[in-house]
Amino acid sequence: MTEGIRYFFVYGTLRPDDNSKAPWTQKFLKNMIYGKARIRGARLYVDSYPVVLYPDKDATASDIVTGYVVTTQDDALLAEKLRYADDVEGHPTHYQRIVWDGVEILEGSGPTTVTAWVYTRSSTDEGAKLIASGDWLQR
């Protein structure tokens, strides 16, 4: 696994409670472990798909994007899911996969932070809408 990263932070159509009926969601999540999470210092937009911009010059430390961390203890499955997510996200031409330190896991015995892969873009399509809540389900 590249750089030893064992988590994905998913905030849109790859999250387990996504209600957009994206055809890839269930295949990505099959045999994976996930829990609610958030990142700080980022904002969520929607154009054709959900987008976290990086860098986002207008994001502040109080901006939050909610989603899930997704992982597995199976190294082969983790590598397979990384390839699959890269395909879904059009990495590296459409979305970039970056390392995000400090992803907060919200379930369990209090927030724990992990380092995770996050798919981002450096810009949105014209007419993209900011989702002020940072929650894809509130778009």
Image (cartoon, rainbow, N blue to C red):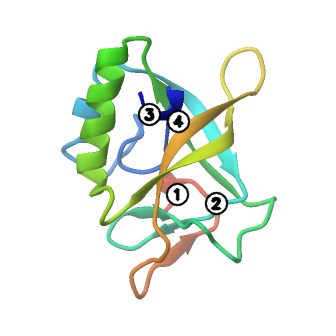
Q: Quadrant of residue 75?
A: top left
Q: Nearer the viewer, mark 3 or mark 1?
A: 3
Q: Please tell me whether residue 122 is drawn above or below residue 26 in the rendered image.
A: below
User: Where's residue 48, x and y in %?
Assistant: 32, 71
Q: Is residue 13 left or right of residue 45?
A: left
Q: Nearer the viewer, mark 4 or mark 3?
A: 3
Residue furthest to the front: 3
Residue furthest to the top: 73
Amino acid carrying label 4: it is Tyr
Q: Identify residue for label 2.
A: 133
- How far is mark 2 from mark 4, CA to CA? 15 Å
Q: Nearer the viewer, mark 4 or mark 1?
A: 4
User: Where's residue 90, x and y in %?
Assistant: 27, 57
Q: Quadrant of the N terminus?
A: top left
- How far is mark 4 from mark 1, CA to CA? 15 Å
Q: Please tell me whether residue 90 is drawn above or below residue 35 in the rendered image.
A: below
Q: Identify residue for label 4.
A: 68
User: Where's residue 135, x and y in %?
Assistant: 56, 53
Secondary structure, mark 3, is: helix
- How far is mark 3 from mark 1, CA to CA? 33 Å
Q: Are the residues flagged by discs 4 and 1 in contact, CB closer than 8 Å?
A: no
Q: Identify residue for label 1.
A: 138
Secondary structure, mark 2, is: loop
